[in-house]
Amino acid sequence: MNQEEFARRVTAMQDRMYRVACAYLRGEHDRLDAVSQAILRA
């Protein structure tokens, strides 16, 4: 998988990742931070 393919897949999954974060975290900042950290680690 090249960078373009990875970026396309991450963009497609971002909303789903945020909804999962909503189930676990209360604060908006914490949710966004969790999604960002997951993307960075990937």
Image (cartoon, rainbow, N blue to C red):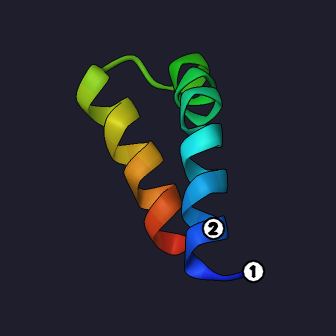
Question: From the image, which quarter does the N terminus lie in?
Answer: bottom right
Secondary structure type for disc 2? helix
Residue for badge 2: 6
Residue in the image at 52% along x and 29% along y: 18
Which of the 4 quarters of the picture holds residue 3?
bottom right
Q: Residue furthest right?
A: 1
- Tell me which amino acid carries mark 1: Met
Query: Label 2: how many residues lie within 10 Å, few (<14), some (14-19) or many (20+)?
Result: few
Residue 16 placement (x, y as % from top left)? 65, 28
Residue 12 placement (x, y as % from top left)? 63, 40
In this image, 27 relative to 13: left or right? left
Question: Compared to 37, does 17 lie above or below?
Answer: above
Q: Name the mark on residue 1.
A: 1
Question: Compared to 3, does 22 lie above or below?
Answer: above
Q: Spatial distance from mark 2 to mark 1, Cα to Cα?
A: 7 Å
Secondary structure type for disc 1? loop
Residue 36 placement (x, y as % from top left)? 39, 52
In this image, 33 relative to 15: left or right? left
